[in-house]
Image (cartoon, helix red, strand yellow):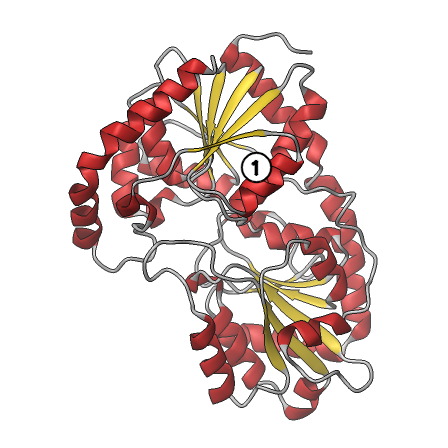
Amino acid sequence: MKVAFLSASGELGGAERCLLDLIRGLRRELRKFDPMCILPEEGPLAEALRQLGVSVEVVELPKFLASTGDSGERSRLTVALRLLAGVPAVPAMVRRLRRLLVDRSCDLVHSNGVKTHLLSALAVPRTMPLLWHLHDFVGARPVAGALLRAAAVRPVTLVANSRAVAEDAAQRLRLPSVRHIHNAIDLTQFVPESLEGSWLDSAAGLEPAGGRVVRVGLVATYARWKGQDQFIDAVAQLGDSIRQAGRFYIIGGPIYRTRGSQWTQEELHRRIRERGLSGCLGLVGFQSDPARVMRSLDVVVHASTRPEPFGLTIAEAMAAGRAVVAVSAGGSAELFRPGIDALAIRPGSVPDLREALARLIADESLRRRLGASAAVEARKRFDLHRFAGEFAGLYRNLAGIDDP
C-alpha cells in the first residue's frame, strides 16, 4: 500500500513525532506498506524519516503560508490579508504536489497538519482517498477553521487525536461526528527507569547541584501557550527551602516559523533573571532523545495555558514512571486520573502549579506512588500496536486494499 504523508513542518514537534511512531507501527501492521513523506523543508524530521528508510520529497510551502498562523494572532483581518496576498503562489504548488502524488500512484494520502489539510483539499485527486489527521482544535484557529469547513466539501476522512479535538471539529466543521484515535508512544523506549540527571545542569548552564536535588522539568516547544512563563512564576513563588531542594529546567526550543507564536530564549532568560532564579532554573535546548530527558527528571510539568489537543509529553512522562503535574483540560484530561496518575492543575493557574510543585518536591513517597501508577496506566492507554492497528484498518477500508 503506497501511502503519502504530508507534513506542514520539517521540525520535530508532537505531531511530527507521532507521525514517526505511526510509520514504525504501520510497518508491523501492514504487510505491503510503502510510505513516502512530503515535507516543506529539510530538517530534523527529514533526517529521522531517512533513518527509517522512508522516501522523502521536499515541496516548499509558499513563504506567506509558512509564516502565517492564526492560533496566536490577535487580528483575524491580519491573517486573512496575509493569506489573500499569497493566493497567487498557491496554484503552482498545488500542481507540483498533485503531479507528485499521481506520478507515485499513491493509494492514500495522510495529511498531518492544518496547512497541509488545506493544500491537500486542492491538490489530491478526488479518486485518491484523503485522510486529515487533526492534532489541533479547529476552534482555536478561526480563519483556518473557516477554510477547513469549505475544504471539507471534498470527500475526506477526519481522525482526531483525542475525543476533545473530535468533538470540537465536528461542531466547527458542521459534521455529525469525527472519529478519534489516541496517540501512542514507543513503550520500549519510555520505560520506568531512572538516569542520573546531572547532565541537565551542564546543558542548562547551571552550577552542579551539591548533593541530591529533585529535578523538575517543563518539556515543550517554545509556543507561547505552553506555559513556560507560568512555570517560571510558580518556581519563583515557592518557599526558599522547597526551591533550594529542587533544580528546574525548561527543555525544548522554537520549531515554528509562524510570526509571534513563540517565546525567544532572550525573553525566557530575562524572565528568569527578573525572578531571581538564575542559579536554579535554566534552559535546556531541544533534545533528540526525549526518553533520556524523561528518565533524568523526577517531576515532569505540563502547564499549557489553554486546553491541550492531546499532550504527548504527559503520555511519555507517565510511561517513564515520572511524577507528573498536568493541566486537566481538553485532550490532556483524557490521559490520566487526577490524584492517581498525576496531579491535576487548571490552565493558566500559577497557584495550582506552585502548590503541586511544592507537594511533589517535599514528598518522595507521593512522587513514587504517582510514577508507579502512571507507568501501569500508560501501558494500557498508549500502546503503539493499538494505535497503528486502528490506522491500518482504516487505511484498508479507505484504499479498498486487503493487506492482512
Side of 389 where 42 appears, left or right: left
Asked where in the image residue 241 lies, by quadrant, the reply is bottom right
Q: How many marks?
A: 1
Residue at (54, 48) in percent of width and height:
12
| Above/below status of 191 relative to 343 | above
Q: Nearer the viewer, residue 182 or 24?
A: 24
Residue at (76, 70) in percent of width and height:
197
Residue at (34, 53) in percent of width and height:
71
| Above/below status of 60 relative to 69 | above
Q: Position of residue 393 (x, y in %)?
A: 60, 18
Q: Position of residue 43 (x, y in %)?
A: 51, 46
Side of 404 where 40 appears, left or right: left
Q: Nearer the viewer, residue 216 or 31?
A: 31
Q: Position of residue 123 (x, y in %)?
A: 33, 23
Q: Position of residue 23 (x, y in %)?
A: 62, 31
For the residue carrying disc 1, how many other residues have a C-alpha within 10 Å: few (<14), some (14-19), or many (20+)? many
Which quadrant does the N terminus fall into? top right
Side of 41 where 360 appears, left or right: right
Which quadrant does the C terminus fall into? top right
Residue type highlighted by circle 1: Leu
The answer to whether one can see residue 377 in this image is yes
Q: Nearer the viewer, residue 298 or 127?
A: 127
Mark 1 highlights which residue? Answer: 19
| Above/below status of 117 relative to 402 | below
SS at circle 1: helix
Residue at (63, 79) in percent of width and height:
205
Asked where in the image residue 134 lies, by quadrant, the reply is top left
| Above/below status of 235 relative to 42 | below
The answer to whether one can see residue 152 in this image is no
